[in-house]
Amino acid sequence: MTRAFNFSAGPAALPEPVLRQAQAEMLEWHGVGASVVEISHRSADFVEMAAQIEADLRTLIGIPDDYAVLFLGGGATTQMALQPLNFAAPGQAVDFVVSGHWSKIAIKQARPYVDVRVAADGESGGFRDLPPRAQWQLSADAAYVHITANETIHGVEYPDAPDVGQVPLFADFSSSIASRPIDVSRYGVIYAGAQKNLGPVGITVVIVRRDLLERAGQPRADIFTYASHAARDSMLNTPPTWNWYVLGLTVKWMLGEGGVEEFARRNAAKSRLLYTAIDGSGGFYRNEVAPVARSRMNIPFFLPSAELDGLFVAESKAAGLLALKGHKAIGGIRASLYNAVPLEAAQALVAFMDDFRRRHG
C-alpha cells in the first residue's frame, strides 16, 4: 500500500501513526473485549478515556481552568447557530467581521435569532486581506464579536487575536486550531470542527469561558444548551464515540511530537516553501492574498488559465498529490497544509509545481 500526500481541506489528512493505532484497536480496545465504538459512553472505561482526552487537549492548547471544554456533534456550522441561542438575548446585537465565505455562513446561521451587525467586511476587495482593525465599527451593546480565525476557502488568517474591548470575542478556529500557540484568555468562545487539525470529521470542540455559560440566552431545548452539555461532561446525549477516540489519539500524537510550538515551526516551514515557489514563479502561479494576511493552513493559487488549472489537478493526482482542486467559490488550486501534512508533502508539491511550470509555462 502506498499512501499519497493528501492536501484536502477537510475531511483532511490524519497522522499515519494515529490511523495505524486505530486500525490495531478497532476490534478490541484496552482489554474490554470489544471495540471502543461498541461500548457504552457511560462505562467507566470510556469516561476515563474522555477525561484524559480533555486533559491532553487542555495541555496541548493551554486552556485555563475557567474555560469549559465540550466535545459535540453537529460541526462548526451548528455551533454558529447555537451561540446566539446560548449567549444573546432575543434581538440583541451581535457584531460580525466578514473575512470570507465562512464568516458569511456564520451570519446566515445567526440571523434568525439576533440583530446581525456587520462591523467590517472584506468582500469588496475580494477577501484578499483582513478588514483593517481601525475601521471596524463595533457595538458597545453587542452580545459578542465573531471572527473566523482562518478562512479555509479564501486563504486569509488572523495573525493574532484582535482587541475588541470588553465584549467577548468568539472565533471559528476550524482550520487553524492547535497549529500554533494562542492565548485562549483573549477569547470568550473558541470552536472548531476537528476534521482539519484535531482528528476526524464528526466531532467539534467548543472552548467556552465558564461565566458565559450563565447567560440566559434565548428559549431553546435543553439539548441545544451548552451549560447542560458542560454539566454532563459532553454526555448529555450519546456522543460520537469513535470520533472522540480518534481525536484523543491525534492530540496524544501532537503532544508526543512536541506540541503546538513544534507544529507552529513545521507549519511555518511548509507554508514558506509553497509561498516562495508561488512568488518566484514569474507570475505563472499567483496567490492574491495580502502577504500579512496569508494563511499558513490553506493556500489558494491560480495558474494563467482555467484549462491549466484542470490539467494541474489531473497531473498532480496522477503524481500522488491529492485534493488540490480549488473550492468552487473561487476556483484555481488550493493546498491545505494542516498539522498531519508532513514537510515532505510540501516539498513534493513544490517539485511538481516547478516541473509543471517548465512543461507548460
Image: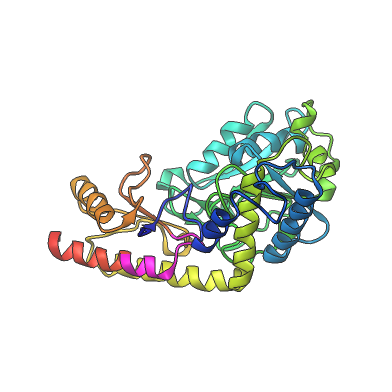
Residue 317: x percent and y percent? Answer: 28, 53
**71 left or right of 267 in image:** right
Which quadrant is the N terminus positioned in?
Answer: bottom left
Residue 57: x percent and y percent? Answer: 70, 60
**264 left or right of 114 in image:** left
Residue at 63% in and 61% down = 251
Give the camera-side residue of 117 and 79. Answer: 79
Give the camera-side residue of 144 and 33. Answer: 33
Residue 193 is a magenta residue: no
Residue 201: x percent and y percent? Answer: 55, 45
Residue at 51% in and 61% down = 15
Q: How many marks?
A: 0
Magenta span covers which residues? 337-348
Residue at 68% in and 38% down = 94
Rendering quarter of residue 224: top right
Above-or-below relation of 63 to 230: below
